[in-house]
Amino acid sequence: MKLWDIYATMKNDVSYIERELERTVVSDHELLNETTLHLLKAGGKRIRPVFVLLSGKFGTYDLEQLKKVAVPLELIHMASLVHDDVIDDANTRRGSMTVKSKWDNRIAMYTGDFIYGKALTLVTELKNPDIHLILSKAMVEMCLGEMEQIRDFFNTGQSVRQYLLRIRRKTALLIAISCQLGALAAGADQNVSRLLYRYGYNVGMAFQIRDDVLDLIGTESQLGKPPGNDILQGNITLPVLYALQEPRLQEPLLKHIDEIRLNNGHSDATKALDLIRYSNGIKIAEQLADRYIQKAMDALAELPNQRAKRNLKDIAHFIANRNH
Amino acid sequence: MKLWDIYATMKNDVSYIERELERTVVSDHELLNETTLHLLKAGGKRIRPVFVLLSGKFGTYDLEQLKKVAVPLELIHMASLVHDDVIDDANTRRGSMTVKSKWDNRIAMYTGDFIYGKALTLVTELKNPDIHLILSKAMVEMCLGEMEQIRDFFNTGQSVRQYLLRIRRKTALLIAISCQLGALAAGADQNVSRLLYRYGYNVGMAFQIRDDVLDLIGTESQLGKPPGNDILQGNITLPVLYALQEPRLQEPLLKHIDEIRLNNGHSDATKALDLIRYSNGIKIAEQLADRYIQKAMDALAELPNQRAKRNLKDIAHFIANRNH
């Protein structure tokens, strides 16, 4: 089964969320409309709203209520993507200083801030302070994850634990609370929302590990960009950490990573990628992702049988095996 | 009476808020502690918490409750200042690309995001969805104000109305809701919180106009930086708009502003400043600020007599006449 088939069964509701996403970010500000609508049209898997809706099936499914968490969660994800566009490296600035390029960074930043604000405004309509608290805490954790990523750029001495804590904050948490808040907004009982949180957390961890593996082994046509992007940025991911543990590979790999660092990422990643692909790092990382998927399945096993449960199972399988 | 004297009567409570500000932003992340504590130590007038506390006197004054709006409001102000540090102009980047300077922009951005998140987390402890909604709407409006400022950089054709709408969003709104939320968190009645909102809104408008005037007429020792900062950035403020309406001044002033724009702000503002100071722009802007102060006083007049009311009156006078 493809992810698309799961969406097909909930096509109308996902389309409704899509329209609401658009409606929420429209303002009377022309430039903001340009940037936000561009972001929306760029698409994305809308995996967070899908998790909200499927989790909502374990309570009293009410699309109007669920929308008020589904849209904010996707918007928070989008805002974090825009903020990811803010750059520091003056060398990567393109050509001459037109007004547009001059204000790019600030526009990306304020567009993100605006989207965060809109997300929060919509969620407050739920009048459920528990949900507000969970959401704002997650935003804080996401920032910490981003700050840790910056701190750990090119840190080849970091531990696997450090990596896992970082992707927990950066990715897994928002997926976990998508499931949890879907259940809470549908009035599902505490135990159900806890199990769905656990499912989402583990799926999120597997999702990010898979993402990091794909960046190392994917082809340009699968990824839509050349592989090795993470390592050029200095983002040391799980397979790299495992590869660095292999005595024969450690020294040459450290050398290549150091070259990339000294060139501020304006480098060729091929040699480093070859070494990592040659190592056992990819396999061990995939095994860890599989263990997370298994934990997600264990959480699901305790939930009542229904179509949404099968769908969540299919999504977990899709995530573990996706090639893009 | 100096602002300091007003603070003196509420010294203990302001000190408590100061400690809580610090406690709220401390994390287990070393770099974040560095940036946030640096921001806190840099000081600031803490005018927003003072408005919250004084407005709280019109209801049941409970510092523990008021803290939960006073700290978030000051944090939101601080976060907006950090985000203001994010720059685009590659030319202003200093010297060689150390790791620290390399990540400055992103660190400023994520520090701001983190502080926003912490502010929201604290306010959700109030379990009052109305307050959450007012706060998140204000955040959206502030972003719109910042975006408008970017859009209107060097726009010498903008109207006074455009300027007023922008400073309303950028500054006045947050001060207005500081008063409103102080009253709401203290359980004051709707009419009182509405009057305090009106007071805060008008004081906020006067505050920003005065700020913009000071940037044109202040001395370097009063301002802590050379005057003319706004115009070098392309920020066309109220006295400039009025000066541009004077037939004799329009052409030479437009020429000077255009020079600044073509030099991306790496210019001398002296000639433009001389023309603006020579115009009636400063005086007319000050008259408008006085009218806002008068409206703030009118709102106060309807509130019950008590020391907090006299304090709010003193603050309004201080704002209208301050030199720094």
Image: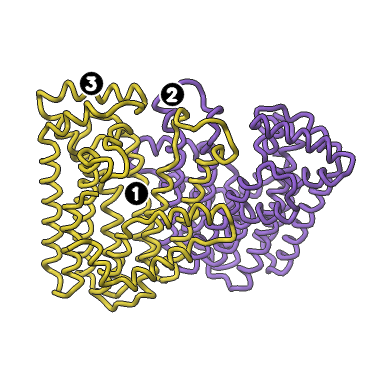
Chain colours: A yellow, B purple
Is label 3 in a helix, a strand or a loop? helix
- Looking at the rendered structure, the secondary structure element under dot 2 is loop
Question: Foreground mark, 1 or 2?
Answer: 2
Q: Quadrant of the C terminus of chain B?
A: top right
Distance (Cα) linking label 1 and label 2: 27 Å
The residue closer to the viewer here, B115 or B164, is: B164
State yes or no: discs 3 and 1 in contact (Cβ < 8 Å): no
Of tags 3 and 2, the one toward the viewer is 3
The image shows residue A130 at horizontal and vertical percentages of 35, 66
Q: Residue at x 78, y 34 (%)?
A: B255
Residue B87, above or below A197? above
- How crowded is the residue under tag 3: few (<14 C-alpha within 10 Å), some, or many (20+)? few
User: What x and y, as percent, mark residue A272?
Assistant: 22, 28
Does residue B46 appear in this view? yes
For the residue marked with disc 3, what is the amino acid? Answer: Lys
Q: Please tell me the numbered disc located at residue A255.
A: 3
Observer-nearest of B19 and B232: B232
Q: Residues within 10 Å of mark 2 (few under 14, many from 20)?
A: some
Q: Which residue in the protein does label 2 denote?
A: B97
Residue kind at label 2, given as amino acid type: Met
Relative horizontal placement of residue A19, taking residue A52 as reference (left or right): right
Work out whether A237 lies above or below B143: above
- Dot 1 falls on a residue whose secondary structure is helix
Q: Residue furthest right?
A: B248
**Residue where numbered disc 1 is placed:** A142
Q: Is residue B211 visible?
A: no
Circle nearer the N terminus (3, 1): 1
Amino acid type, residue under disc 1 in the picture: Met
Cβ–Cβ below 8 Å for labels 1 and 2? no
Is residue A46 positioned above or below B213 on the image?
below
